[in-house]
C-alpha cells in the first residue's frame, strides 16, 4: 500500500486523523460484533456516564515498521489484559482480550498507509479506550458502553536525542493507597493535570509522586514508571499497589536480566536513598525511557552521576536493546511481537 504524503521526520507527538477507527457497543449485556468506520466523531447523550462520573479507561501502544519491512505491534495481549483489569475495577464490562488484539490488528491494517517507514523515528500510536455511553444521573455504573480504537502517526518523542530531564518531588498525591492508581483510568490522569502544570510553571519537566500513606516512598510520575540503576549495576524499580503496571517497565526488567545479564529487583524505594543511585529513568510507551538527570526535593538537589548531557550507560543499553527488539533488529522473546503484516 502506498504511504500517505506525510513528512515523517517533522511530525510531532499529537493527533492526526487517520482513515478508519474500530467501534463496538455494549448493550443488553453483550458486545456487538464491532466495525471499522470512517466517522471520527463520537455522539453520546449529554447525560452519558462518562461525562457525569468519568467512567472511562484507555490503553496506549504502537505499531512499527521493522527493519525487514514487516508491520508489527508490541505485546498487545498485555494491553488487553490491563484494560480488562481496569474495566473490572470501574464496574465496566470486559471487552474480550482476544477480540481486543484482533481489533488492534484490524485497525492498524485499515490505516496501513499511516504506519511510518522504518528509520523515520516515527510510529503509529494506537489508542484503545472504553466509556459509559448511556444516560446516568444517579451515581452508579452505566448500562451501555462503547469500545473504540483510533490510530495516529507520531514522531519521535525526543527530537534530536533524549536529554536528561529535571523533576521535582510533588506536594500532590497521585493515588490513594487503596484507590485506582494501578489501573489506566482517565480520572487518574485528570488528577495529575494540576500537578504537572504547576511543575512546568516552576521550571521542572515532571513530578515524582510519593506514596500517599507515608510520603516516604517513590511511586511514579503522572504517566511513567521509574527505573533506577545502582552504582554496582543493579536495575531497581519501585514496588507498590498504587502504581500502574507499565508494560514497558516489565519488558525492560526482563531485558535487563535476560539480555544484558544484570541483576534486577522490584522493591520499595525510599526517597532518602535516591542519592545512592547512579542512573534514573522514566519508562513508558511514548518515549520507552526518558533519562532523569536531577531530582529536586523542596530545594535539595539530588544529581545522578550519569549527568545532564546524555543517558546513563546502562539506561542507554536498556533503551537500545528494547527498541532493537521492537524494530526487529534483535530477536524477540516468544510472544512479544504481534505481526500485523509480513
Image (spheres, grey):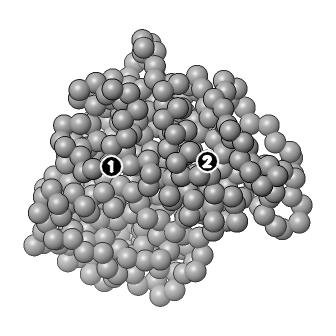
At 82% from the left edge and 67% from the top edge, which residue is drawn?
Answer: 140
Label count reads: 2
Q: Which element carries disc 1, helix, strand or loop?
A: loop
Tell me which numbered mark, 2 or 1, is placed earlier along the sequence: 2
* Real-space Cα separation, disc 2 to disc 1, in angstroms: 23 Å
Quarter of the N terminus within the rendering: top left
Above or below: residue 322 compared with residue 117: below
Label 2 belongs to which residue?
Answer: 129
Q: Residue at x 39, y 81 (%)?
A: 217
- Rendered location of residue 338, percent (x, y): 37, 40
Residue 183 falls left or right of residue 54: left
Q: Position of residue 62 (x, y in %)?
A: 42, 40
Please report the residue visible at 81 percent of the width from the left and 42 percent of the height from the top: 44
Q: Is residue 194 visible?
A: no
Foreground mark, 2 or 1? 1
The answer to the question of whether label 2 and label 1 lie on touching residues, with beta carbons closer than 8 A, is no
Which quadrant does the C terminus fall into? top left
Q: Is residue 85 left or right of residue 117?
A: right
Quick check: 137 left or right of 14?
right
Vertical order, 239 against 341 (above or below): below
Crowdedness near tag 1: few (<14), some (14–19) or many (≥20) residues, C-alpha within 10 Å: few
In the image, 320 versus 271, the foreground residue is 320
* Residue at 21%, 71% in the rendered image: 264
Q: Is residue 252 visible?
A: yes
Q: Residues within 10 Å of mark 2 (few under 14, many from 20)?
A: many
Which image quadrant for residue 292? Answer: bottom left
Residue at mark 1: 335
Q: Where residue 78 sits in the image (x, y, percent)?
A: 44, 55
Amino acid at each position: 500500500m502506498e504511504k500517505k504524503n506525510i513528512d515523517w521526520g517533522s511530525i510531532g507527538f499529537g493527533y492526526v486523523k487517520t482513515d478508519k477507527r474500530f467501534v463496538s457497543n455494549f448493550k443488553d449485556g453483550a458486545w456487538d460484533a464491532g466495525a471499522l468506520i470512517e466517522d471520527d466523531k463520537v455522539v453520546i447523550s449529554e447525560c452519558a456516564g462518562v461525562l457525569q462520573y468519568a467512567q472511562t479507561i484507555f490503553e496506549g501502544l504502537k505499531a512499527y515498521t521493522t527493519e525487514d519491512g514487516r508491520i508489527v505491534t508490541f505485546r498487545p495481549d498485555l494491553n488487553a489484559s490491563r484494560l480488562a483489569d481496569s474495566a473490572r475495577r470501574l464496574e465496566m464490562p470486559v471487552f474480550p482480550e482476544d477480540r481486543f488484539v484482533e481489533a488492534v490488528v484490524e485497525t492498524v491494517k485499515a490505516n496501513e498507509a499511516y504506519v511510518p517507514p522504518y528509520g523515520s523515528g516515527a510510529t503509529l500510536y494506537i489508542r484503545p479506550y472504553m466509556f459509559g455511553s448511556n444516560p446516568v444521573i444517579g451515581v452508579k455504573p452505566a448500562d451501555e458502553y462503547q469500545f473504540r480504537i483510533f490510530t495516529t502517526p507520531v514522531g519521535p518523542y525526543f527530537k534530536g536525542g533524549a536529554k536528561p530531564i529535571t523533576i521535582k518531588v510533588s506536594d500532590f498525591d497521585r493515588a490513594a493507597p487503596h484507590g485506582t492508581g494501578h489501573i489506566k483510568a482517565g480520572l487518574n490522569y485528570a488528577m495529575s493535570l494540576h500537578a504537572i502544570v504547576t511543575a512546568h510553571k516552576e521550571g521542572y519537566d515532571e513530578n515524582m509522586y510519593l506514596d500517599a500513606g507515608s510520603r516516604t516512598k517513590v511511586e511514579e510520575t503522572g504517566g511513567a514508571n521509574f527505573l533506577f540503576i545502582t552504582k554496582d549495576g543493579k536495575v531497581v524499580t519501585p514496588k507498590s499497589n498504587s502504581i500502574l503496571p507499565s508494560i514497558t517497565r516489565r519488558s525492560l526488567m526482563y531485558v535487563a536480566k535476560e539480555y544484558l545479564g544484570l541483576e534486577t529487583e522490584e522493591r520499595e524505594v525510599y526517597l532518602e536513598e535516591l542519592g545512592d543511585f547512579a542512573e534514573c529513568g522514566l519508562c513508558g510507551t511514548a518515549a520507552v525511557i526518558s533519562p532523569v538527570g536531577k531530582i529536586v526535593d523542596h530545594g535539595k538537589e539530588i544529581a545522578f552521576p550519569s549527568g545532564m548531557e546524555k543517558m546513563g550507560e546502562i539506561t542507554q543499553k536498556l533503551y537500545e536493546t528494547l527498541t532493537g527488539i521492537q524494530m526487529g533488529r534483535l530477536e524477540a522473546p516468544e510472544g512479544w511481537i504481534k505481526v500485523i503484516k509480513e
